[in-house]
Amino acid sequence: MEKAAAKARIEELSALLKENSRRYYVDNAPTMSDYEFDTLMHELEALEAEWPEFRAADSPTQRVGSDLQKGFVQRPHRYPMLSLANTYSISEVEEFAARAEKTLETGFSYCCELKFDGTAICLTYRNGKLYRALTRGDGVRGDDVTANARRITNLPQTLHGDYPQEFEIRGEVLMPFEAFDALNRERIDAEEAPFANPRNAASGSLKLLDGDEVARRGLVCTLYHIPAQSGLDFASHDEALKAAASWGLPVSEERRLVHSIGGIKEYIDYWDSHRRLLPYATDGIVIKINEMEYQRTLGYTAKVPRWAVAYKFKAEQALTPILSIDYQVGRTGAVTPVANLQPVYLSGTVVKRATLVNADQMEALDIHEGDWVYVEKGGEIIPKITAVEPSKRKAGATRPPFPELCPDCGTLLVREEDEAKWFCPNGDGCPMQIKGRLLHFMGRKAMNILAGDATVDQFYNLGLARTPADLYDLTLSQLLSLEGWKEKSARRFKASLDASRDVPFDRVLFALGIRFVGETTAREIAEHFGSIEAVAAASREELLAVPDVGEVIADSILTWFSDDRHRIEIERLRADGLRFAMGVRAAGLSNALEGKTIVVSGVFSISRDAIKELITRHGGKNSGSVSGKTSFLLAGENPGPEKIKKCEELGVPVLGEQQFRELLPETEADHAPAQASLFDDEPTLF
Ligand code: IVH
């Protein structure tokens, strides 16, 4: 490459990488895949090696990405928090091992570990107590997230055993897939943008200002590094981690000591296929020289240790053509483009549809009609299109125009200045929005009324229901006169409407579908104000006083209650017997599980929430993790392997769903909140 071209490309790559680093670390919303990012970084490294005169002091190759954020106190790291050299190529791992063997001669080992895909954390323990937790920040200073780290369930506040008076230990904060899926489902219900992956969800959650919400999000931590400079006298990395485990700290247990490149490759091969069984995300393997003495010999570059390398797995991808694009109108009128794909097998499931998020994302991906696209699923519940394969583009293909009119009702779409999405403003007349609101109201986490898409279509098309209150006016004979309805289905539907009268106020508030008021926010507002009258009468300032309610949510609530039609609807629902004030929760069914602490894992004949509710209504307590206090693990299909392993270690009994139901009084055992659909038409987007 010519000198001028090299200079221009170095500048271009630096700008691109800096921008994406900010999106990754600060916004928790990367727009580039890890693989693309790493490939561009490697290109920049190679160019700078060839043209060192063009390497800027602040080049992304010279510093770690920064997660520093406003609103947190920043503190210096005692020892810089570095990154790891990474590669996607086995031959580069071989080169790393060959270099080590040449420099170190004999008598050393490699410690192979999982590369956890979360957000890095640096903990200080002082006198056996968790004293401080810092994020990586820019590697030199980190954000102080101590209060939030204290809410991470598996992180001990107090150590035991023979721990040093003060030391630092580093690791990764992770959001397990199960917690991630639950969080994203809530966010989608509340029409909030879902997190792209568990890593973004973990780092976003660690930076929340509300500790209770942090605790609720189910973060876990795994620790993998005690800085050698800390003066602790360990002969090897493995011994340091063993000691940390003996003080009660969660260290990565999957690590293995091996003595040759052959051992490294075996470890890589094993985890390349088995990592899918882990309950959290990993994106590769880290290979570390185990002996501290040899780590010192090899030392550090400005950015990474020379004694370690990360081998990264490529995210599983599938390449498939777009058959067509649908523009879906949500209950708030937001229009989401969704690609219909030629069905393709990916990480255990067949993917037929993938979100294109919004018009900006379609433009950023440069989507053309009929393009072949790469689809990834790495832990996400909604498959994502990460890139287009330009070599497969048909000559003359054009960009699909984003519709100007609502695909459902034909109204001109609008886009507010700070909105990423186009909206159909015809909230009252747009069938998709009306049906979307009904479906949201009836949803499992809202009023749990047994009906899905097809039933709502039927009610809407026959003019039987436009608002939730209309549902309560439907009579048995009306239902029986409808096509496809039988006595049994009509009675079950009416019974689920009856049961919805016991749904607590916080879920009723969520069911109303006020924009941005998700399940958690609804619970906080309900608990704070106690009744719908108090919420309706609250001023902006009073609403802002609720934790987690910011200006956008407060304004949305004010707008919702300022609409007289909404107030009339509330009065109708009140007359139907719904709960509009906090009060006693659903009545208990028995004391059969009193004193029992139960961990639930896997898939059951009813939803997991319903199982948990059954436990509490029979006097038991739910817990998220297996410990010595667990009475038993209630395991459905495919329970978490880690949980089963822990039960084996601690001798905790494991019960199946049938055995569990046998513990409950016979007549009550099928009082579980109903979940199965009347028909097989539960709403499913993907
Ligand atoms: S060791 C001085 N071990 O990956 C080296 N890092 O891409 C300290 N990571 O910044 C890091 N799993 O946040 C180490 N087993 C592991 C890891 C690991 C994940 C993260 C860490 C690091 C990043 C580099």
Image (tube, rainbow, N blue to C red):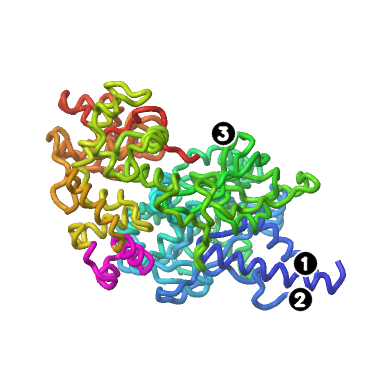
Q: Which residue is mark 2?
A: 54
Please, what is the three-letter code of the amino acid marked with disc 2?
Phe
Please, what is the three-letter code of the amino acid marked with disc 3?
Val
Q: Is residue 124 left or right of residue 64?
A: left
Image quarter hosting the N terminus: bottom right
Tell me if mark 3 has few (under 14), some (14-19) or many (20+) residues whose alpha carbon lies within 10 angstroms of its own.
Answer: few
Query: Which-is-in-front pick, marks 3 and 2?
Result: 3
Give whichever of discs 3 and 2 has the lower sequence position.
2
- Identify the residue at the far front of this view: 463
Numbered circle sitting on residue 350:
3
Q: Is residue 441 visible?
A: yes
- Residue 378 in percent (x, y) is at 54, 46
Numbered circle sitting on residue 411:
none
Give whichever of discs 1 and 2 has the lower sequence position.
1
Q: Residue at x 74, y 62 (%)?
A: 43
Please say if 598 is above or below 84: above
Q: Which residues are magenta?
A: 536-561
Residue 544 painted magenta: yes
Q: Give the prevailing secondary structure in the magenta stretch.
A: helix
* In-front residue for pair 116/304: 116
Q: Is residue 564 left or right of residue 260?
A: left
Q: Which residue is mark 1?
A: 47
Q: Residue at x 63, y 60 (%)?
A: 85
- Residue 500 in percent (x, y) is at 23, 40
* Quarter-of-image position of residue 486: top left
Kindly report the distance in space between the C-alpha atoms of the residues bearing marks 3 and 1: 41 Å
* In-front residue for pair 101/482: 482
* Quarter-of-image position of residue 454: top left
C-beta proximity under 8 Å, tags 1 and 2: yes
Is disc 3 placed on a helix, strand or loop? Answer: strand
